Amino acid sequence: MPHNPQTGADEPPELPPEVVAALAEHGIAATDEVSLRRALEQHTPSYSLFRLSPAAVKRWKCRYRVLLEAGYYDGMSAAEAYARALLAMLPAPE
């Protein structure tokens, strides 16, 4: 994770461009974790977010996993995992 020397905190990676583009096709401009979580909560009654162990990070090349009724969605940040799960719950754009 990139480190911000001004705040001393680690910053989550930005969303991949293809995820941002897919969200935009659905009219979703939000790219932050909280907004994406709230959008996901509007489309599903329940989900679980897991932060993966270091061994799982090496194996699956992701840090977070969202479990939904339809499957699981991985991301390097919680925002990316929420975005991928949200995209899976939305109907295909016309």
Image (cartoon, rainbow, N blue to C red):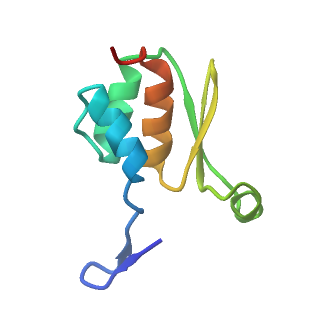
Q: Residue at x 45, y 46 (%)?
A: 80
| Res. 73 image quadrant | top right
Horizontally, residue 76 falls left or right of residue 90, namely right
- Observer-nearest of 87 and 56: 87
Quadrant location of the C terminus in the rendered image: top left
Above/below status of 19 relative to 14: above
x then y, percent, for residue 39: 33, 27
Q: Residue at x 27, y 78 (%)?
A: 7
Q: How many marks?
A: 0
Q: Residue at x 42, y 14 (%)?
A: 91
x then y, percent, for residue 10: 41, 72
Most extreme residue toward the bottom is 5
x then y, percent, for residue 59: 77, 59
Above/below status of 77 relative to 86: below
Q: Residue at x 62, y 55 (%)?
A: 62
| Res. 22 image quadrant | top left
x then y, percent, for residue 47: 55, 26
Horizontally, residue 3 falls left or right of residue 53, namely left
Above/below status of 67 relative to 2: above
| Res. 38 image quadrant | top left
- Observer-nearest of 89 and 33: 89
Above/below status of 43 relative to 32: above
